[in-house]
Amino acid sequence: MAENEVWIFAEQEDGVLNSVALELTGKARQLANELGAKVGALLLGHHCEALAKELAAQGADSIYLADHPALRYYRTLPYARVICDLVREHKPQIVIYGATVVGRDLAPRIASELWTGLTADCTDLQIGDYDDPFTEKHHDQILYQIRPAFGGNVIATIVGPNHRPQMATVREGVMKLVPADNHRPFQTIHVTPKITDAEEVVEIIERHRTEREVDLRKAQIIISGGAGVGSKDGFDLLRELANVLGGAVGASRAAVDAGYISKAHQVGQTGTTVRPRLYIACGISGAVQHRAGMQESSKIIAINSNPDAPILSIAHYAIIGDLNQVIPMMIRAYRGH
């Protein structure tokens, strides 16, 4: 039995782990250490056993490997059946998933089947005690599921003291990837999936992949614009600087809401959390919701005409001036003329 385990769903596609699976494994290791528990990773797919070592290197003690042709590609019902069966058999206390397209589809299905709670889009997970004000019952070491609410204006801490497992989906990029330990011992538990005709109602005939418009999580240099950029055309200047530096273009929620750029570029609590080597904030005031998504960048340069803008409080370098004058100067300097 694994009643004292913290589990993560190790999402993979075509034999490659989603980066959020590794991020969650490191976080699960931290939570498990506080609980005196072990970490289990749920690895479903076909011919994917080699991925177990990567999960172990991030902190997994046990890899629950369900290797079956029916699990080669993600489908809701077969994956949910395998995980529900495992949870019922081993009874982990916590199960966490990435808040990816797959995780957001899979986790609610499992929560409904198991009659347990689920908190979506968490930005942090912690362990703590809880005193129920209604029952006056004390709960030791339960999962604090922390996420923004009301458009990011409130940070809510949600608990599920009365149901197990405690479940949450976690946004990509918010958990730091811990250094890998390639010598960690682990065990692989081979699982025989019990997939019936009831789970085989969907057949994959063809697969068509659409690449992300931009993957800010992998960018080492990000040039972000806010409402101060002023227009869609204003972002052309940021794109030019990004091309010169070999970076990507990001944006604040204000710029996205104004229609200057698509939501795929949004950085912050309601967008993507990033940790690039260099983050250049152009015309961004620096609301707390935006800062939460980029404040761990190695170097932050803020360009703003307002000397009192909140973004300046976390910037390593501040340039007080009109971005339409400053950025062309930067472009010329980097081009050497």
Image: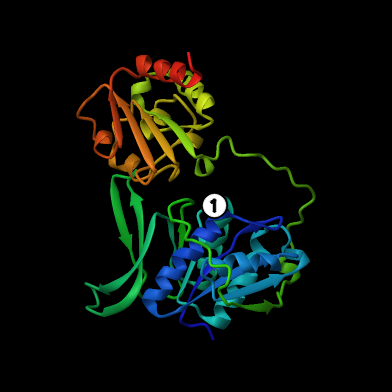
| Residue at screen point 44% across, 79% down | 37
| Residue at screen point 55% across, 74% down | 184
Residue 316's x, y, as percent?
Answer: 30, 37
| Residue at screen point 50% across, 44% down | 217
Which residue position is annotated with label 1? Answer: 100
Residue 223, placed above or below residue 154: above
| Residue at screen point 73% across, 43% down | 208
Seen from the viewer's position, the closer of residues 101 and 55 is: 55
Left or right of residue 271: residue 159: left
Outermost bottom residue: 1
Residue 16's x, y, as percent?
Answer: 66, 56
Seen from the viewer's position, the closer of residues 190 and 337 is: 337
Q: Name the amino acid, label 1.
A: Thr
The number of callouts visible is 1
Determine crowd level at label 1: few under 14, some 14-19, many 20+ residues with C-alpha closer than 10 A.
Answer: some
Left or right of residue 311: residue 179: right
Task: State the SS at label 1.
Answer: loop
Decide if residue 233 is in sight here: no
Residue 45, placed above or below residue 241: below
Residue 134's x, y, as percent?
Answer: 23, 73
Left or right of residue 202: residue 281: left
- Quarter-wise, where is residue 225 in the image? top left
